[in-house]
Structures are given as C-alpha cells and as structure tokens.
Amino acid sequence: MEQSLLLVLFAYLLGSLSAAIIICRLMGLPDPRTVASKNPGATNVLRIGGKKAAALTLLGDFLKGLIPVLLGVLLAVEPRYLALIGLAAFLGHLFPLFFAFKGGKGVATALGVMLGISWQLAVAAVLTWMIVARLSRISSLSALVAALLAPLYGWYLDLDNALLLLLMMMSLLLMVRHHGNIKNLLAGTEKRIGG
C-alpha cells in the first residue's frame, strides 16, 4: 500500500510538469498561458511555435500519463490504486502544483493513462478521434467524442470497476475543461483543424 501511495504522489508531481510551458521556455517561445487561447497544451503551442514544439508538447503530456501507470502495472498494484495513479497524473496536468494549479485540458495525458491501462482502449480512443476529426475537421469535438466513448470501450474490454470509474471521471473532467469549446461548437464558431 505504501508503495502504491508513493506512486500516486509521483504521478501527481510528474503530471504537474507542464510540457507546454517547459518546451516554450526551452525554445524561446512566449508563455502559452499568455497568448492565443492561453491554454498550456499542444494545440496552443502549435499556434505559437509550430509543429515541432507542438509535437514535443504532445509527447511530454502523453508520457506523464503513461509512465506512472505503466510503473503501477509493472509493480502489479491493485486496480483501485492503479486508478488512483492514473487520476493523480491527470489531475496533475489539470491542476499543476508547479504552475499555480493552472493546467491544460488533459487530452494527451488522458490518452497516456489509457495506454498504460490497456493498449486496446488507447487504440479505440485514437481511432475514434481520427474518424471524428476526418468527418468534422474539429479537434475539440474529436477529443470530446473519444472521451465520452472511453468508458464504454473500457466496459466492453471488461476492465475492473475502479478503472471504469477512472475513465468516467476523466471523461467528465475533460467535458468541464472543454466548456468553452462546447459553447463554440453549439454556436458553430469552433475553429477547424488547419483553420
């Protein structure tokens, strides 16, 4: 149990490292919290720094969800603690200790958590994102649909109830973090990919 709780703490601290802010500082770019959408995430970094900076941000956010969960899997922690580890990494991204608790929206970190839990779950989420993005050309809508369907995919894959609860909580928090995007989608003003 002590080992599992240390992993939960590690997951939160790792999640609190904002890839967007760190990458922008290293590359001499503006703080993503102060320009464009003011969101410290890969999409905003793409706007202000281009594809390389955005790809590095995406990778960083993804890995901080994947690494602690994979450690939990390798150490064979109970599913309830694995769920707490995944949630801690996700919450670290949303509410980072090192950046005044003002984080990103959590899509890439959630995907990292999902891959740590089940590669089939992650593939299903990515395919959902790709299909919706292809049809709509709207990144936020693609992420929202993938997040909404993730618990259903988890149920189909017969994941432990604690992990299903984790997926539902991440899905709900992703909806909350995308409230501005949801308003824009309803108003028909949400920006399209490449727009």
Image: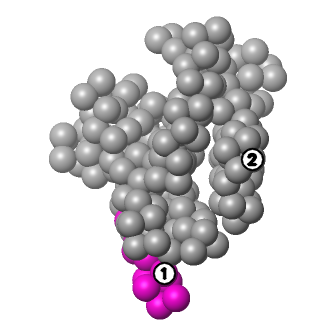
Question: Going 77% across and 30% down the picture, which residue do you hit?
Answer: 183
Q: Is residue 59 above or below residue 77?
A: above
Quarter location, residue 178:
top right
| Circle number at residue 104 | none
Instruction: Give the residue furthest to the bottom.
Output: 2
Q: Closer to the N terminus: mark 2 or mark 1?
A: 1
Whole-percent x, y for residue 36 in the image? 46, 32
Question: Going 62% across and 25% down the picture, which residue do you hit?
Answer: 128
Marks 2 and 1 sit apart, C-alpha to C-alpha, by: 24 Å
Start-end of magenta stretch: 1-14
Q: Nearer the viewer, residue 114 or 21?
A: 114
Residue that label 2 marks: 155
Residue that label 1 marks: 4
Instruction: Give the residue furthest to the right.
Output: 186
Q: Nearer the viewer, residue 179 or 171?
A: 171
SS at circle 1: helix
Amino acid type indicated by mark 2: Trp
Question: Going 30% across and 24% down the picture, which residue do you hit?
Answer: 51
